């Protein structure tokens, strides 16, 4: 890549929209030689889910939540490391603390019996309540770093406000922790003749990558049968037109969106041995905006194996790879990876708790060739229950 002379910032460029996907666009300028980078990333992150306060912050004598030492009857006792909660702690006392301001101490003043200086009304993770410094006899502090991160000393607690009988339980917003990303990185510059040139690199990933060792034949009792995945794809394409002598006449480049569908075969379930532990699929319905690019374009994703010992499997990263096929048997390449939480199955096979929890998604990249064009892009596809 060329040397950069600026950081990535939000771009005003508007890529094609994809139903059910969020999109972020970033750009930067580069020196040596002069060029521009454009990054377009789609994701299927869901909106925050309102979740019961007691579910997110369960009672525990020794909490495993970062920044919290214990929780009793909903009352949270913080540790001295509250950076993870900095943006969730609000209230007049905390909001008034400026960056790099140290030593904001609080303790109860015995001479003001009706005022409890060690208690401060506020909000924690959208829940109203009060923050308290111990029992009033100790001294606590609160400060902010130069970056504005709030830090509390040990001894602070948060108590939710009492709720009226029958009122709905407090809820807190929980962010989607399992989602896929896919898109592309485009660099635009000029060659020695002053002609505009560009290069494209597909991008894909997810928040919870799965190493395929968890899906290998050694773990075959956890995964049997097949799982279907459906999603979207995007990238860049070039379509060619030809003269009456069948010579290339015009080249039409642009961004495409498309449909992605894949099937992952695990062990058992009547699956043929040569099909087990492999993924096949296709990319179809290529469009530039609302216009079909070429109705004949369908890119087949030939089998990519993910079983142990497969040549197409990268054992460390869990990425598997295969061949793509356009029309006239023209070939390219593709790769992918599973994402989602690993299954936690009940060891008691006599109960109904042994339900399969297939990986929640597959993301990857591909290139493909057709007699009248080519594509380079990435995809993200989610598991379908049926």
Image (cartoon, rainbow, N blue to C red):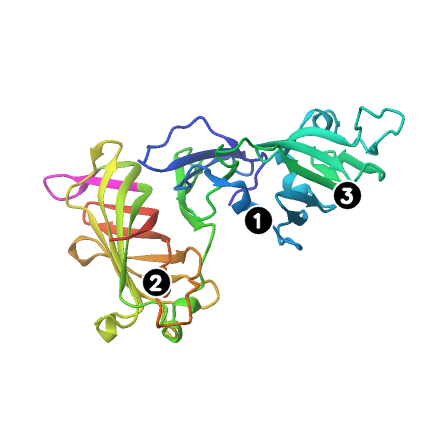
127 sits left or right of 181 in the view: right
Give the image quarter of residue 216. bottom left
Which mark is first along the chain, 2 or 3? 3
Relative to 288, residue 207 above or below: below
At 34% from the left edge and 63% from the top edge, which residue is drawn? 355
Let me know if residue 147 appears in the view: no
Local packing at callout 3 (Cα closer than 10 Å; few below 14, some 14-19, many 20+) is some
- Tags 3 and 2 touching, CB below 8 Å: no
Let me know if residue 355 appears in the view: yes
Comparing 286 with 206, the one in front is 206
33 sits left or right of 213 in the view: right
Q: Is residue 215 magenta?
A: no
Magenta: predominant secondary structure element?
Answer: strand
108 sits left or right of 368 in the view: right
Comparing 28 with 246, the one in front is 28
First to last magenta residue range: 237-249
Counting from the top left corner in percent of width and height, residue 170 is at 53, 36
Residue at mark 1 to residue at mark 3: CA–CA distance: 19 Å
Give the image quarter of residue 94. top right
Relative to 325, residue 142 above or below: above
Disc 3 is placed on an element classified as: loop
Residue at mark 3 to residue at mark 2: CA–CA distance: 44 Å
Relative to 135, residue 330 above or below: below
Q: Is residue 242 magenta?
A: yes
Disc 2 is placed on an element classified as: loop
Residue at mark 2 to residue at mark 1: CA–CA distance: 26 Å
Residue under circle 2?
Answer: 355
Residue under circle 1?
Answer: 58
Comparing 143 with 70, the one in front is 70
Which mark is first along the chain, 3 or 1? 1
Counting from the top left corner in percent of width and height, residue 143 is at 77, 34
Residue under circle 3?
Answer: 155
């Amino acid at each position: 890549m060329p040397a950069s002379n600026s950081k990535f910032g939000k771009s005003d460029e508007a890529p094609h929209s994809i139903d059910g996907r969020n999109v972020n666009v970033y750009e930067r300028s580069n020196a040596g030689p002069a060029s521009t980078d454009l990054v377009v990333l789609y994701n299927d992150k869901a909106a925050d889910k309102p979740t019961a306060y007691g579910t997110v912050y369960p009672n525990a004598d020794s909490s495993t939540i970062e920044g919290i030492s214990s929780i009793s009857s909903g009352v949270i006792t913080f540790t001295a490391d509250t950076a993870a909660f900095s943006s969730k702690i609000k209230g007049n006392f905390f909001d008034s603390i400026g960056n790099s301001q140290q030593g904001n101490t609080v303790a109860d003043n015995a001479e003001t019996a009706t005022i409890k200086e060690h208690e401060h009304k506020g909000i924690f993770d959208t829940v109203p309540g009060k923050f308290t410094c111990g029992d009033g006899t100790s001294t606590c502090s609160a400060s902010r770093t130069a970056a504005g991160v709030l830090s509390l000393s040990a001894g602070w607690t948060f108590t939710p406000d009492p709720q009226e009988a029958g009122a709905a339980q407090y809820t807190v917003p929980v962010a989607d922790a399992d989602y896929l990303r896919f898109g592309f990185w485009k660099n635009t510059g000029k060659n020695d003749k002053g002609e505009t040139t560009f290069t494209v690199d597909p991008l894909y990933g997810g928040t919870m990558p799965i190493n395929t060792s968890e899906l290998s034949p050694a773990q075959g009792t956890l995964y049997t049968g097949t799982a279907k995945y459906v999603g979207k794809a995007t990238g860049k394409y070039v379509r060619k037109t030809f003269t009456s002598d069948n010579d290339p006449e015009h080249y039409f480049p642009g961004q495409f969106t498309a449909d992605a569908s894949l099937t992952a075969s695990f062990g058992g379930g009547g699956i043929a041995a040569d099909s087990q532990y492999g993924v096949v699929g296709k990319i179809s319905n290529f469009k530039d905006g609302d216009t079909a690019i070429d109705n004949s374009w369908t890119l087949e994703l030939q089998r990519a194996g993910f079983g142990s010992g497969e040549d197409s499997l990268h054992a460390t990263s869990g990425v598997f790879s295969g061949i793509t096929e356009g029309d006239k048997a023209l070939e390219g390449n593709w790769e992918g990876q599973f994402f989602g939480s690993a299954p936690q199955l009940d060891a008691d096979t006599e109960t109904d708790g042994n339900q399969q929890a297939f990986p929640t998604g597959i993301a990857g990249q591909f290139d493909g060739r057709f007699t009248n064009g080519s594509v380079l892009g990435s995809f993200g596809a989610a598991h379908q229950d049926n």
